[in-house]
């Protein structure tokens, strides 16, 4: 739902609509560097795909599916004109980590902080996100300043490499030593999750927050991926290396191959840190797979915590094409605490309800000396009861006490003459 930010009452941030596509295309073209033809071509392809499948994507957002958050776009509107846009998407299956794909703002309003307002809107509206992730080019000073201003910190440094077609043909001449190379299925998700966990440092693993379900493909997701490959004329090949002694996966690759030959092949490579000798073997396998398609360059990435991969790619003559920073930011939402029981208005009889007797006790005299036996009567004639005590005692008890006092006194007076006669 749209929100009006307090920083500028004229700025309204809302989900994008079909009428915003032309303005979004204009913003993207201004933000992309003209000297990068591959980025411009990729952007034009995405916008053309968005124009064609807008209503289908809008329908998919109504229920959970892999395309529900395919294009999660928000625009910043000022005076009924789109001045900025942000594109985000979930990074893992549980949607605890989200990724900022792109932030674009017109140059005329960058000083107003609309980029920061777009980021904060996503932080506050997407409450299931606990961590945010993004990649930014090291030469993009404005984007770096924007992200650092909003709390993003460097997580890792990434380097993108490109292997020329001639070098791929040379690598394909070798024979890869991969005796346990297996295809990937949903049954191998736990093995791939363990390999992914072991191949990255703890901080990166905590930010990614993946589990075994992230390496599974649902039936609906497989159908969508098949349609996507058919439309884009691409093919995805993947496999992993199994270690039978440890019963673990030690290497994994996935390559997206272009059948038309108008864009480079893209590969993803994961190797266990204890088996770095797999880099030459897996790259040879990728080169042999690419020989069945039109000659194109192969692109893959390496991180600063993978020095063996960078060393090998530099050794074989791969070209560095881009250097980026992976940045992350944690978001802690303040949850509204609901008080089930209010202690302020609670009475003591409600607190000690479990300690009350089953029935209300009747006040009266009690004797703890001998229960079940009548208490002995004690009379103290030397200390008559007080007036107050007489008022409290019943009348029958007062009469009975006076009679008993007379009986005790009378025998004492008659025994003295009887004693004198007996003595005579």
Image (tube, rainbow, N blue to C red):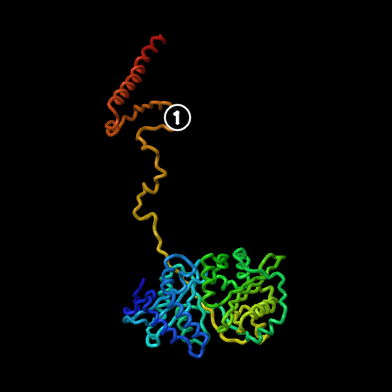
Quadrant in which the N terminus appears:
bottom left
Does residue 283 lie above or below 61 as drawn? below
Horizontally, is 156 left or right of 247 in the view? left
Circle 1 residue: 370
Residue ID at (63%, 85%): 165
Say which residue appears at 43% left-offset and 71% top-offset: 56
Residue placed most toward the observer, 166 or 152: 166
- Classify residue 405 by image quadrant: top left
Q: Nearer the viewer, residue 43 or 125?
A: 43
Query: Dot 1: what SS?
Result: loop
Left or right of residue 410, residue 303 in this image: right
Rendered position, 178 above or below 349: below
Q: Quadrant of the C terminus?
A: top left
Of residues 299 and 130, the one drawn nearer to the viewer in this rendering = 299
Give coordinates of residue 75: x percent, y percent.
Answer: 39, 78
Q: Position of residue 129 (x, y in %)?
A: 47, 69
Q: Is residue 23 above or below residue 129?
A: below
- Residue 307 visible in the shown view: no
- Is 49 in front, or is 339? 49
Question: In the displayed structure, does residue 345 sit left or right of residue 212?
Answer: left
Task: Say which residue appears at 34% left-offset and 54% top-offset.
Answer: 345
**Residue drawn where x is 37% and y is 48% of the image:** 350
Q: Position of residue 183 (x, y in %)?
A: 64, 69
Residue 300 point in image, percent of width and height: 60, 80
């Amino acid at each position: 739902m749209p929100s009006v930010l307090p920083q500028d009452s004229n700025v309204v941030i809302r989900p994008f609509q079909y009428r915003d596509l032309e303005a979004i295309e204009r913003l993207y073209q201004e933000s992309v560097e003209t000297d990068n033809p591959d980025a411009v071509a990729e952007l034009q392809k995405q916008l053309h795909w968005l124009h064609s499948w807008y209503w289908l994507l809008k329908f998919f957002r109504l229920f959970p599916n892999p395309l529900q958050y395919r294009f999660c776009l928000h625009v910043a509107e000022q005076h009924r004109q789109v001045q900025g846009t942000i594109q985000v998407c979930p990074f893992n299956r549980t949607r605890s980590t989200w990724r900022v794909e792109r932030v674009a703002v017109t140059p005329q309003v960058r000083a107003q902080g609309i980029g920061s307002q777009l980021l904060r809107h996503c932080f506050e509206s997407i409450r299931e996100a606990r961590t945010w992730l993004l990649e930014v080019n090291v030469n993009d000073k404005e984007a770096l300043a924007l992200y650092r201003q909003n709390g993003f910190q460097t997580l890792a440094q990434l380097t993108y490499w490109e292997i020329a077609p001639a070098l791929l043909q040379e690598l394909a001449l070798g024979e890869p030593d991969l005796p346990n190379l297996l295809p990937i299925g949903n049954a191998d998700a736990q093995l791939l999750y363990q390999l992914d966990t072991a191949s990255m440092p703890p901080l990166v693993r905590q930010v990614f927050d993946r589990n075994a379900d992230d390496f599974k493909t649902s039936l609906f997701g497989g159908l969508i991926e098949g349609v996507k490959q058919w439309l884009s004329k691409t093919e995805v090949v993947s496999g992993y290396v199994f270690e039978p002694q440890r019963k673990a996966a030690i290497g994994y690759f996935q390559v997206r191959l272009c059948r038309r030959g108008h864009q480079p092949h893209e590969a993803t490579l994961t190797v266990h840190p204890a088996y770095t000798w797999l880099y030459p073997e897996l790259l040879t396998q990728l080169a042999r797979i690419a020989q069945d398609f039109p000659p194109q360059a192969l692109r893959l990435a390496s991180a600063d915590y993978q020095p063996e991969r960078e060393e090998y790619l530099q050794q074989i003559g791969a070209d560095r094409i881009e250097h980026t920073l992976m940045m992350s930011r944690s978001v802690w939402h303040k949850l509204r605490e609901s008080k089930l029981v209010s202690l302020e208005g609670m009475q003591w009889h409600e607190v000690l309800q479990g300690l009350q007797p089953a029935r209300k006790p009747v006040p009266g005299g009690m004797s703890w000396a001998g229960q079940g036996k009548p208490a002995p009567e004690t009379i103290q004639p030397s200390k008559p009861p007080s007036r107050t005590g007489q008022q409290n005692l019943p009348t029958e008890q007062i009469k009975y006490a006076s009679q008993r006092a007379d009986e005790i006194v009378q025998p004492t007076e008659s025994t003295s003459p009887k004693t004198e006669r007996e003595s005579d």
